[in-house]
Image (tube, rainbow, N blue to C red):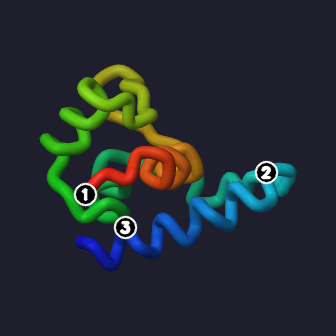
Amino acid sequence: MFAAFSALRDEFTALRRDLTTPVDLEGEILTMAGVTQLLGVSSKTVVEWHHKFGLPGVKVGRPWRFRRSEVVRWIGEHHVR
């Protein structure tokens, strides 16, 4: 899990360096399964982080959707462990 966060922090640092780079929408929108895989945590933890700590995501009907770049940026800013 910590290796995943390390990689996300590196990606966050790169995003912060060049915020003018256009977002590639291919792979940008993640489902709950995509976010749990990216972060290495359960869906229950993702929902908890959303409600308690403001992890960016929205419910579209019943399913959740997340912008990968926003999740990566959030991880980098919040240093969640």
Residue type at mark 1: give it: Arg
Tell me the element at label 1.
Answer: loop
Earlier along the polypeptide chain: callout 3 or callout 2? 3
Q: Nearer the viewer, residue 35 or 1?
A: 1
What label does residue 19 carry, if any?
2
Residue tagged 3: 5
Decide if residue 80 is on the left or right side of residue 73.
Answer: left
Q: Could you tell me residue 40's position as x and y percent?
A: 24, 64
- What residue is drawn where x is 25% and y is 27%? 52
- What residue is drawn where x is 31% and y is 51%? 80
Residue type at mark 2: give it: Leu
> Are discs 3 and 1 less than 8 Å apart at CB?
yes
What label does residue 81 carry, if any?
1
Q: Could you tell me residue 51's position as x and y percent?
A: 26, 25
Decide if residue 76 is on the left or right side of residue 49.
Answer: right
State which mark lies toward you, 1 or 2: 1
Earlier along the polypeptide chain: callout 3 or callout 1? 3
Rendered image quadrant of residue 4: bottom left
Tell me the element at label 2.
Answer: loop
Q: Could you tell me residue 13's position as x and y percent?
A: 62, 64
What label does residue 55 carry, if any?
none
Q: How far is disc 3 from disc 1 in space, using C-alphas?
A: 8 Å
